Image (cartoon, rainbow, N blue to C red):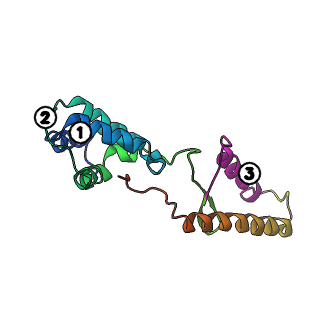
Amino acid sequence: MPPSPRDTIDYLKTAFSPFNTIDLILKLSALRLLPENGEKAIRLDLLLHVAVSLKNLSGPRISRKKLNDIINSKIIKESFFKHQEDPSINLFCEEISFYNGGYRVFPGCYSDITFQIKNTLGALFRVQQEYLSEEIKNELANSILFVLNISEVIALKADIKRNTDVKTF
């Protein structure tokens, strides 16, 4: 069972309280600017809200390792807040499920294009009526798989991941 929101907030207050509040706010704000952390907005906002609630102006600056340990701790990874995060829409990389699993795709600047593609694929391949012959469905599926596999290879070579831990500097 995940820790309660109150337990998570109390953990963060205790973990952050020894450190300089201004330094914490600056470092956490910078983490919000990293594209890799786009899908972690809820957790990062929580961390910022907790840091802003503290008033330690004379404490030491938090180290990169200590900050990383706190924000990627088990209690944060299993928290209610992490479970509220969905993959981001149109940030950089999205996922489409098709035959043989999920494929990472790059929607670019097109609003809701991944949603539209998912619906189109569903209409083509999940309908019971035979609007399309099996031959056409197979040809379409092979073409779509070819494009999705190219996109997946690009994501692999560029080391672009989904549902990862919060990145630090």
Amino acid type at image mark 1? Ile
The quarter of the picture where residue 18 lies is top left
- Residue 101: x and y in percent read 59, 66
Circle 1 — which element? helix
Q: Mark 2 points at which residue?
A: 58
Q: Mark 3 points at which residue?
A: 120
The quarter of the picture where residue 143 lies is bottom right
Name the residue at 25% across, 42% down.
Answer: 4
- Residue 153: x and y in percent read 61, 68
Q: Would you place residue 22 above or below residue 118 in this image?
A: above
Q: Does residue 126 show up? A: yes
Report the side of 10 relative to 26 (left or right). Answer: left
Report the side of 69 relative to 101 (left or right). Answer: left
- Which of 16 and 145 lies nearest the eye of the viewer? 16
Name the residue at 70% across, 46% down.
Answer: 116
Eye-nearest disc, 3 or 1: 1
Q: Would you place residue 51 above or below residue 115 in this image?
A: above
Q: Name the residue under label 1.
A: 9
Q: What span is colored magenta in the figure?
A: 105-128
Query: Is residue 96 magenta-colored?
Result: no
Label 3 vs label 1: CA separation?
42 Å
Q: How crowded is mark 1: few (under 14 residues within 10 Å), some or many (20 or more)?
A: some
Name the residue at 36% across, 37% down.
Answer: 45
